[in-house]
Image (cartoon, helix red, strand yellow):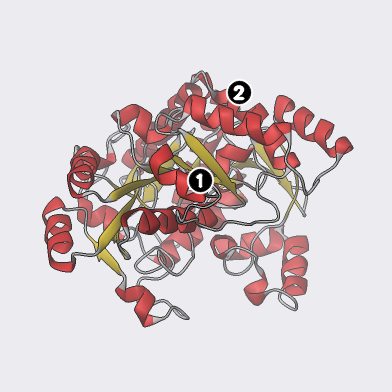
Amino acid sequence: MSIEQTYVERNPASARLYQRAGKVLPSGVTHDSRFVRPFPVYAERAAGARKWDADGHELIDYVMGHGALMLGHNYPSVIEAAQAQLALGTHYGASTLREIEWAEEVTRIVPSAEVVRFTSSGTEATLMALRLARTHTGKPGVIKFDRHFHGWHDYVVANSRYSVGAPAGVPQATLDSVSVLPLEMAEVRRTVEERGDIGAIIVESAGASSGQLPVPRGFLHELQAFCRAQGIVFIMDEVVTGFRWAPGGVQEIEGLKPDLTTLAKILAGGFPGGAVCGSREVMEFLRFPDPGTKTAKVGHPGTFNANPLSAAAGVACLREIADGRHQRRANDLAAQLRAGMNGVMCELGLPGFVYGQASEFRVVIAGTQVPEAQDYDPRDLPWALLEEGMPAERARLLHLAMTNHGAHLFGAGGLVSSVHTEADISRTVGAWREALREMRDEGAA
């Protein structure tokens, strides 16, 4: 029986739910990354490093809430904080103590954070960061980098992983205000000189998209220094890397201090929430001006900004991860997983790599080089191979095959939490071996 046939036979309840979803949801999904043919699995519950689907299968989870769950599903202190708040109310339409505590935790942990403004998502955070930057500099132009993902709003969707060509529905005037560049300082300098209107440069801190294509060594330092010299607002998108690469994100590891940082995912402990934080000088454009002054004010409503439930969970989560032990454990487990998966590829003689940064892993089954049984720094791997990735059909079959064997990947890769175990890693490597054998038998690897 083929990989896809096995998947279909194992998941009749998910198939039925997908047919039902297709009647009321475009393509039957609520997030582009959850779309998979012939249908996605539907989850019913989760705990720790596992979730259970509608057909009762137990899956080791490497989606981890799209990266939001550094502590895994239902971490006790986070859930207890949320439950306590739930009993008190979910939305007051008023300021709360929890939002102050949440902001205090962010400023304590994130090196560049002097002031914080909460949003409901990472997309909203990058939108706000760009508006603040344009207000501060008086310049409308933005530089982003090829295939770097900063959400789905108009100013960042061009040449992201979701829109390689001209994005549908975005006005040309908006696209013209953004220059999409390779990760090359010469191109940055040339563009700033030629345009003369660049007020902001935004970068995914670990590379596009959060590590698939890594940032070259030293690039972020050069970029920060250049922005300082030119009076350009330097924005580090740490929506994925914040609190995961280290408590203070990539900027803590690299010793950087961006003007603005965007955050989400781990920030809210598995609940909806994002934030912009950074220098008081730039963030103060959100302040209400003193009476009689004419200082510019960036407007920012938002019904669910810093809602009590997200704030309570966020405070509990940030206090739990602040000392770095959860990050160190997840990073160590991810390194074990990457090395083990590469060892299987070596054993089977399949070309490609499993690589990643911090607690993530990414799979490329392509090229001609068979990996050794080790972990790889993506900056030392062939750029062209990482950029091309593997054929979409191969990635699809890999996802199905791994699901059949009890491991739910996030696309062609995933994220490890601090509550995964060595046994989970061993079991996943075994699932990987079986999935690759099946793909090879089908001529797909």
Q: Is residue 314 visible?
A: no
Q: What residue sits right under mark 1 in the picture?
A: 434
Q: Residue at x 28, y 53 (%)?
A: 386
Circle 2 residues within 10 Å: few <14, some 14–19, many ≥20: some
Query: Which quadrant is home to the N terminus?
Result: bottom right
- Image coordinates for residue 195, horizontal then vertical, percent: 18, 67
Q: Nearer the viewer, residue 191 or 391?
A: 191
> Of tags 1 and 2, which is closer to the observer?
2
Q: Residue at x 61, y 42 (%)?
A: 61
Q: Nearer the viewer, residue 344 or 381?
A: 381
The amino acid marked with disc number 2 is: Arg
Q: Which residue in the rendered view is the most extreme toward the right?
A: 87
Q: Is residue 223 visible?
A: yes
Q: Which residue in the rendered view is the most extreme toward the front?
A: 292
Above or below, comparing residue 212 to residue 81 in the picture: below
- 226 vs 308, left or right, is left
- 270 vs 287, left or right, is right
Q: What residue sits right under mark 2 in the picture?
A: 319
Q: Earlier in the sequence, mark 1 or mark 2?
A: 2
- Image coordinates for residue 385, horizontal then vertical, percent: 25, 55
Residue 271: numbered disc:
none
Query: Which quadrant is home to the C terminus?
Result: bottom left
- 187 vs 158, left or right, is left
Above or below, comparing residue 47 to residue 304 in the picture: above
Q: Nearer the viewer, residue 318 or 421?
A: 318
**CA gap, disc 1 and disc 2:** 40 Å
Secondary structure under tag 2 reads helix
